[in-house]
Image (cartoon, grey):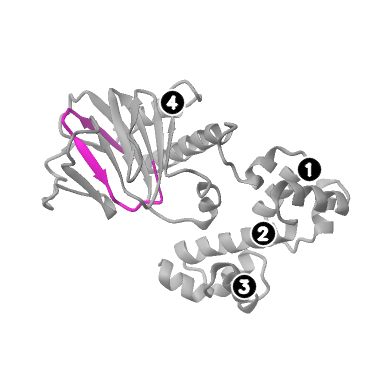
Amino acid sequence: MLRSVMEPPWSLRIQDEAPLTVASIVEGEAWVTPDGGEPEKMDAGDVAVMRGPNPYTFTDHPDTPRNIIIHPGQICTTLDGEDLAERMDLGVRTWGNDLDGSTTMLTGTYEMHSEVGDRLLRSLPDLVVLREGTADLPVIDLLNQEIGKEEPGQEAVLDRLLDLLVIAVLRAWFSRPEADAPAWYLAYSDPVVGPAIRMLQNDPSRQWTVASLADAVGVSRATLARRFSEMVGVPPMTYLTEWRIAVAADLLQHGNLTIGAVASRVGYGSPFALSTAFKRLQGVSPAEYRKVAG
């Protein structure tokens, strides 16, 4: 998390290739423009979600020339490559060109790719702007209060608050009729399919069958199979396979587990069984995926 305090004229070209970034205007105003898109004005209380890796620009005005670039690894330079880290350091997790600047913005970046997260994020446009008052987001005030503190475990506190903000923003966005929410996300509210999805997600290592899942939910096998397919668009066991492979991909990318241990975690009896399913959905073997993703 970072607090940026800016006084016009200013322009930040963000090309850090992060999969997901969330920005909230605390004071003042700003314009955000995705590459190839139209600029959108943001006022205090507005929240923007930018889905990477495509670049975008934050400015005090759309006509302000770009003068600062944010690179991968959150490295900040001028257009000529001069490092600005020290020059624009304004204190604890605070950065900008003027500590008394008219615009204050909170920014949180997720730098790690996640197959599980992408199942929802792929349904988002490159830029989502949620206007002040369209959702109840008290967590923004908490983030603003906490971001300047230097306390034990403070990074963990900020990470969890950022997670809560993302969840709240996505929930508010996908509740709109015009939002293109995934079918499985909408099915969460169904009294039969919703619990079934949560069971599959929470315990992918279990040797589920349609019959055992239906029994756990409390309906007949035929009822669950029909209703699940109608609402989610795929049968329960197909959904389970897709979820298992997404979880396996994240474990391969971000963990140190052996492929055999990953297979066990997601319900496959052997590395070979995992590899067969993984290659069918991802196009590469688990070992190849780990090598490329790592």
What is the quadrant of the N terminus in the image?
Answer: top left
- Which of disc 4 and disc 3 is earlier in sequence? 4
Quarter of the view holding residue 66: top left
Counting from the top left corner in percent of width and height, residue 121 is at: 50, 47
Residue, x 11% and y 41% (percent of image)?
Answer: 87
Horizontal side of 109 relative to 168 (left or right) equals left
Report the Cα–Cα distance between label 2 and label 3: 13 Å
Callout 4 amino acid: Arg
- Which of disc 4 and disc 1 is earlier in sequence? 4
- Mark 3 secondary-structure assignment: helix
Report the Cα–Cα distance between label 1 and label 4: 34 Å
Task: Determine whether 45 is above or below 185 in the image.
Answer: above
Report the Cα–Cα distance between label 1 and label 2: 18 Å
Task: Determine whether 253 is above or below 56 in the image.
Answer: below
Report which residue position mark 1 lands on.
Answer: 192
Question: How many other residues sit within 10 Å of disc 3, few (<14), some (14-19) or many (≥20)?
Answer: many
- Which of disc 2 and disc 1 is earlier in sequence? 1
- Mark 1 secondary-structure assignment: loop
Task: Determine whether 124 is above or below 81 in the image.
Answer: above
Residue, x 28% and y 29% (percent of image)?
Answer: 30
Counting from the top left corner in percent of width and height, residue 184 is at: 66, 47
Counting from the top left corner in percent of width and height, residue 125 is at: 46, 43
Report which residue position mark 3 lands on.
Answer: 274
Report which residue position mark 4 lands on.
Answer: 131
Report which residue position mark 2 lands on.
Answer: 204
